[in-house]
Each structure stands twice: as C-alpha cells, then as structure tokens.
Image: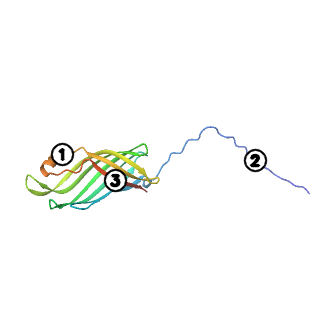
C-alpha cells in the first residue's frame, strides 16, 4: 500500500506601490435633488407660499437648479389679494460642510395697483437674490438650510409706481432631498 499526497502553494509578493483610487461615478439620479420652501402666515395679512425646486449636484460642492413659485397674498387693511406665480434659476456653493453661498434670479407675476393710472394691472417683478446661509445634513444626500438673501435689483420704479416692495432681505428655510 502506498499513499501519495500532492501539495500546491503559491507565493504572492506584496506590491508596496499604492494602487490608484477608483473615481466615484454616480448616476444622474444620485446627483439630483428636490426641495423647496413652504410658508404660511395668517391674520390681517395672509400668505401661503409653495415653492418647490429641483436641482443637480454638478460637483460635490456646487449645485444648480430650477424652481417654481405659487403664493397667495391677502391684506385685509387694503382689501387686496393676489395670486402670485413665478419661476427661478439658482446656484449654490457649499463652503466647508455647514455653509452655503446662494445666487438666484426669480421673476414673480402678480396683480399690483398702479398709482399713476389708478388701476390694478398684472406685472412681472424681477429679483436677483444673493446671499448665504447655513446647512444641516440629514443623512448622506439631504440637508436642511436657512438662507438670508438680498435682492440687489430693488427697482425704485416698482416702489414708486406700485407702492410695492418684496421683503429685503428674504429669509428662507428649506430642505433639499437627494435621491
């Protein structure tokens, strides 16, 4: 009787050179986010604000997007109410992990009383908002934000002709939710 045994082994030399890191590539949807603002105010002045948006993370720190706005505004003192519609484009730059720079161009369409012609007319009200704020991460791809934005296009023609001016600065709280 005889026994035969075979054994195989392999020697692998460790490579001391650092392997190149694979670049993280994500899909379109992983870089896309939705969010916006929602506001309610009731009393002698009533305001309902629904402002959703959609954006895209171009890099890890820079994003851009589009949004729409619907607001209902009513003032009992002046017996005035209007439905406000609008659209916007925006860009955001993340600084460190907790801060944002924000720029936005927005056009709002609303009924305003023309002091010169003494009639109500539907007008477009443009705004260029620039500012910044803080952000608080909610998971990997979502965050809550608080922004303070200044309208640098505060046009005196609107103020004089319509006795109207949007709040400046515009203080917003919102959320961005990634897919």
Secondary structure of the residue carrying tag 3 is strand
Q: Which residue is mark 3?
A: 173
Q: Choose between 36 and 67: the one closer to the eye.
A: 36
Residue topped by disc 1: 155
Q: Nearer the viewer, mark 1 or mark 3?
A: 3
Q: Are marks 3 and 2 in contact (CB under 8 Å)?
A: no
Separation of residues labelled 3 and 2 (CA atoms): 64 Å
In the rendered structure, find residue 64 and report the number of the disc placed on it.
none
Which label sits in the foreground, 3 or 2? 3
Tell me how far mark 1 sits from mark 3, CA to CA. 25 Å
Image quadrant where residue 110 sits: bottom left
Q: At 17% from the left edge and 61% from the top edge, which residue is drawn? A: 76
Within-10-Å neighbours for mark 3: few <14, some 14–19, many 20+? some
Q: Pointer 2: what residue?
A: 9
Residue 88's x, y, as percent? 28, 52
Q: In the rendered view, tell whether residue 106 sits above or below residue 82.
A: above
Q: Secondary structure at mark 2?
A: loop
| Disc on the earlier residue, 1 or 2 | 2
Direction from residue 61 to residue 42 in the image, left or right: left
Judged from the image, the secondary structure of the residue bearing numbered disc 1 is loop
Instruction: Give the mark nearest the N terminus, 1 or 3.
Output: 1
Whole-number angstrom distance, CA of label 1 to CA of label 2: 81 Å
Q: Residue furthest top?
A: 17
Residue drawn at x 31%, y 44% is 131
Q: Is residue 115 left or right of residue 58?
A: left
Q: How is the image coloured?
A: rainbow
Q: Indicate the quadrant containing the C terminus: top left, top right, bottom left or bottom right.
A: bottom left
Mark 1 touching mark 3, by CB under 8 A? no
């Amino acid at each position: 009787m005889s026994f035969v045994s075979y054994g195989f082994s392999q020697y692998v030399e460790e490579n001391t050179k650092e392997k190149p890191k694979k670049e993280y590539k994500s899909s379109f949807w992983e870089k896309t986010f939705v969010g916006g603002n929602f506001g309610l105010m009731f009393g002698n002045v009533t305001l309902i604000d629904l402002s959703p948006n959609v954006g895209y993370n171009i890099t890890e720190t820079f994003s851009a997007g589009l949004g729409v706005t619907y607001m209902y505004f009513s003032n009992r003192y002046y017996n005035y109410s209007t439905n406000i519609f609008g659209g916007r484009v925006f860009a955001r730059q993340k600084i460190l992990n907790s801060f944002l720079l924000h720029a936005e161009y927005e056009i709002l369409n609303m009924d305003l009383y023309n002091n010169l012609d003494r009639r109500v007319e539907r007008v477009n009200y443009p705004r260029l908002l620039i500012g910044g704020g803080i952000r608080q991460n909610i998971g990997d791809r979502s965050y809550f934000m608080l922004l303070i934005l200044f309208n640098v296009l505060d046009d005196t023609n609107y103020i004089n002709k319509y006795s109207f001016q949007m709040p400046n600065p515009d203080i917003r709280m919102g959320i961005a939710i990634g897919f």
